[in-house]
Image (tube, helix red, strand yellow):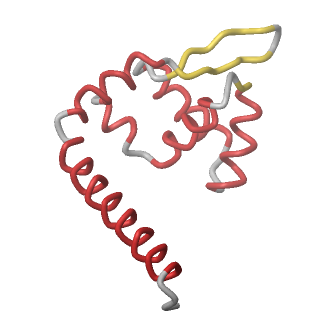
Amino acid sequence: MHAFDVLGDPVRRRILELLAGGERSSGEVTTVIQQEFGISQPAVSQHLRVLRDNGFASVRSEGTRRLYAVRAEPLREVDAWLERFRGFWNQRLDALATELARGRRERRTEGTDGHT
């Protein structure tokens, strides 16, 4: 499965967001995902399996618990692919920063010359 196919699912993206905060048990992940998406425990387990099988998550056993964590490697590959497109939004963000700075300057100027 291609990385964007894995990441294209909102449930899997949410699971990765949860795991980005640190290692979590499958039970913790299931509880949150069931509350937010209203899906069954087997469905959550399937999403965890897709993440694991495609290298986005690792799992380890601790007694009877299965603990999941994010694996950074596939995310680095996605980031590298996105790099070629960053120029498109960086230019817009730079333009926005310029306009915000111009607006702050104008407000300061208006405040110091007696016009409010």
Q: Is residue 112 left or right of residue 31?
A: left
Pinpoint residue 88: horizontal percent, then vertical percent. Answer: 19, 49
Q: Residue at x 71, y 17 (%)?
A: 66
Q: Is residue 9 left or right of residue 42?
A: left
Q: Residue at x 72, y 9 (%)?
A: 61
Q: Classify 11 as above or below 104.
A: above
Q: Is residue 94 left or right of residue 20?
A: left
Give the number of callouts: 0
Frontmost residue, 94 versus 86? 94
Q: Classify 39 as above or below 69.
A: below
Q: Classify 69 as above or below 114.
A: above
Residue projecting furthest to the bottom: 115
Frontmost residue, 96 versus 20? 96
Q: Which quarter shows the N terminus?
A: top left
Pinpoint residue 15: horizontal percent, then vertical percent. Answer: 58, 37
Q: Classify 114 as above or below 97.
A: below
Pinpoint residue 50: horizontal percent, then vertical percent. Answer: 46, 28
Residue projecting furthest to the right: 63
Pinpoint residue 76: horizontal percent, then vertical percent. Answer: 36, 22
Q: Residue at x 56, y 29 (%)?
A: 48
The quarter of the displayed image where residue 70 is located: top right
Q: Residue at x 40, y 16 (%)?
A: 73
The quarter of the displayed image where residue 29 is located: top right
Frontmost residue, 32 versus 21? 21
